[in-house]
Amino acid sequence: MSTGFGPLDGLRVIDASNFLAAPTISMHLADLGAEVIKIERPDGGDEFRQWGHSKGGVGLYAKVVNRNKKSVTADLRAPLGVEIVKRLVRDADLIVENYRPGTFERWGLGYEVLSAINPRLVMLRVTGYGQEGPNAGKPGFGTALEGYAGFVHINGEADGSPLLPPFGMADASSGLCGAFLALAALRERDRSGRGQVVDLALYEAMFAMLGPLVVDYDQLGLVQGRVGSRLPWVAPRNTYVCADGTWVSLSASSNGTFVRLCGALGIPELAEDPRFEGNRARIANVEALDAALQAAIRRFPRDELIRLIEASDAVVSPVNDVRDILADAHIRARGSVIAVPDAELGGPIRMQAPSGRFSRTPAEVRHAGPRIGEHNREVLLDELGLDEAALRDAGYPL
């Protein structure tokens, strides 16, 4: 069914997943115009509705992750719920699920069953460790996989404990990667006429983001450790405190940028110091380099510092909190924060906008996450023609 907007208009996605990573995949697809039908349990819906902060008992994070989606209820452990999924996939392009390997098969919803109904169907399966391998049967939430993938080991100060990220990094990275993989599979389907299974493990997307971690060990025996806000392959790169107690983040990846930065800070001699002539020299002497830069930066309030550095065409940014972001003129002009209608919370709510811009077919957020089963009547009764009494007897809200 057409949504009437976005580059993915006409794509139908069945989101049979829960919690965060897999629903984030379908969120990205819904932002770009796909019709996404989210399947939730009749008795309370996706447990993710209870995660994070709430207002009036309504989960706020779920309002973001489920935006633009339709919510229908189905108990996948019961024959009625299985029948609902089978009817939905008749006209679907993609189904997303994130249960442990073998669960969908046990419920009678394996790919062999669903592809017999719709041979063009793509199934995207998201699990902690993937569908195969020694760990395939293990449960896997993002926190565990952030450590497993190697990210936590390299995150934190050199003399401190390894740090978990303060947001669902494994889930967020899998959301982006999964949306990309789904579209790649659909692109191939449009050529071959046949669907397939895409198997995504939660640790894989984040592991792939860790840069030269593996090749440095393979070729040099280097095990990357924790270096705080620095990078092991470029200097300077850090956060620095200003005279007014606020912070900036800056890097000078090229020699020319480093020279301009030193000039803007009134310490041009630093760029002529043999210890800092060239990136490799700066990496070798990064402690002394950071100390000199911090001493210079500490002389300026943040706004003045940013004006000086930007006037020299070097690179700097304030370390923003959410209040700074919402007040930022560029964020406003770019439309990076949007107000989204939501009847359940009694008015528009603000959240991040979809990433990127399309010149002809823009993304759009038409509504925040719906109530549990808000679209049962539209989808289950009007479209699928299920029996109203049977749905009521099963506890499905109508």
Image: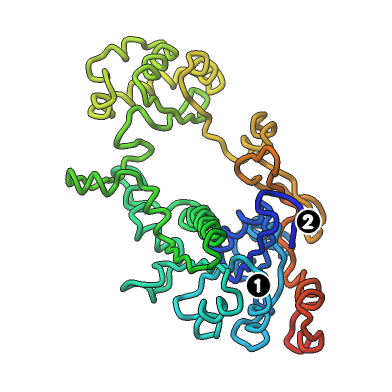
Task: Point out the image quarter for the C terminus.
Answer: bottom right
- In what element is the residue under mark 1? strand
**Residue 200: quadrant of the picture:** bottom left
Q: Amino acid at mark 2?
A: Asp
Horizontal and vertical percent position of residue 231: 34, 36
Q: Is residue 197 left or right of residue 26?
A: left
Which of the colour schemes (rainbow, by chain, secondary structure, one colour) is used? rainbow
State the mark number for residue 39: 1
Q: Residues within 10 Å of mark 2 (few under 14, many from 20)?
A: some
Q: Nearest the camera: 287 or 199?
A: 199
Per the model, the C-alpha gap separating discs 1 and 2 is 20 Å
**Residue 62: quadrant of the picture:** bottom right
In the image, what residue occupies the spot 27% across and 25% down? 282
Horizontal and vertical percent position of residue 149: 35, 57
Q: Are marks 1 and 2 in contact (CB under 8 Å)?
A: no
Q: Amino acid at mark 1?
A: Ile
On screen, residue 2 above or below 398: above
- In what element is the residue under mark 2? loop
Task: Point out the image quarter for the N terminus.
Answer: bottom right
Horizontal and vertical percent position of residue 33: 69, 53
In the image, what residue occupies the spot 44% across and 62% down? 202
Pair 1/2: label in front? 1
State the mark number for residue 342: 2
Q: Is residue 281 left or right of residue 146?
A: left
**Residue 275: quadrant of the picture:** top left
